[in-house]
Amino acid sequence: EVEAEPGFFECDTVAHCGPTTRGEYARTLNLTCVHTGWVFTTTVRNNAHIHILAGLQSAVEHIPFKVAGLDFDNGSEFLNHAVINWAADLDVYFTRGRPYKKNDQATIESKNNHLVRRYAFYYRYDTAEERAVLARLWPLVNDRMNYLTPTKKPAGYGTDRHGRRTRLYDQPRTPLQRLLAAGVLSTTQQSELTDYRDSLNPAEIGRRIADLQTRLIVLAKAKTEQLYIASIPSALPDVRKGVRVQATTDTPLVSRAVPS
C-alpha cells in the first residue's frame, strides 16, 4: 500500500475562527506523512482554493522527500477542479475519506489537536499581523516535531496478562529517524538532514516558540474573549419590560414596572 513508504500525506485545515464563523479568518493547512510522521504546517488567509493551492505548493517544495499522495476530507477547499488538476499535473496520488468517517483520517485529526491547537490555541486570527506571527511560528514547530520529537506508531494488537486486547506500539523514533530508515534518500540528502538536525538548539527553539505564542495571546486573546461574551445570551431579565409578580388568592396577576 502507499502508506508503507514515505510520501503519502493526510491533509486537513484548522479554522482559526474563535467562537464565530462569521467573516474572514485564517486557516492552518496541516499535512502529516502516514509512514514517517513528518509534518508540514502553514497558515493561509482563508480556505479559498487559491490560498490552499499556495499552501500545498509550499508543502511540496519544502518537504525533503517526494510527496507521492495526498488524502483529504470532503471539504470544498480540497475537492475542486483547481486542486485536483494541480495534483494531476504533479502526478500526486489523490484520495479522499468517506463522508462523516473521521477515522479515515485518524493521523491528521490527532495532529490538528496536539500540534495546531496546542501551539496556536483556539483564538480568532483574522489580521495580517496575526498571520505573520503564525508564519514565523510554524517552521519552528515543524523543526521541533520532525527532528527532535520521538513518537510511537501503532504496530498491531496483542493481549495483556488478563487476556484483554491491547494496542501495541513500536519504539519511539523521530520522523527523521523513520525517514532515514526507509532508505528513500540519497547519501547527500541524508547528510544534509542530519547536519541540519545537529545544528538545531532545542532550548532556543522553545524560547522562540514561547515568544511567538505570547505575541499571539497579546494580539488575539481579548478580541476572542469579547466574541465569546457577545455570543452568550444574557440570563438577566430585561428591566425595561417590567417584572412579572405571581398573583395571590386575592390579588390578580399584575405587571409591576421597575422604577427608573
Image (cartoon, rainbow, N blue to C red):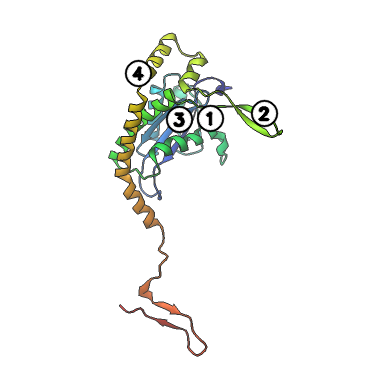
The residue type indicated by label 3 comes to Leu
Q: Is residue 101 left or right of residue 49?
A: right
In the image, residue 71 above or below residue 18: above
Q: Which residue is mark 3?
A: 31
Residue 28, percent from left and from top: 40, 36
Local packing at callout 4 (Cα closer than 10 Å; few below 14, some 14-19, many 20+) is few
In the image, residue 169 above or below residue 80: above
Residue 199: which disc? 4
Q: Which residue is mark 1?
A: 95
- What secondary structure is found at the residue carrying circle 4? helix
The residue that appears at 35% across and 23% down in the rendered structure is 201
Nearer the N terminus, badge 1 or badge 4? 1
The residue that appears at 51% across and 15% down in the rendered structure is 181
- Find out whether the residues at labels 2 and 3 contact each other: C-beta distance under 8 Å: no
Local packing at callout 2 (Cα closer than 10 Å; few below 14, some 14-19, many 20+) is few
Q: What's the distance in space between the residues labelled 2 and 3, CA to CA?
A: 30 Å
Nearer the N terminus, badge 2 or badge 3? 3
Q: What's the distance in space between the residues labelled 3 and 1, CA to CA?
A: 14 Å
Q: What's the distance in space between the residues labelled 1 and 4, CA to CA?
A: 37 Å
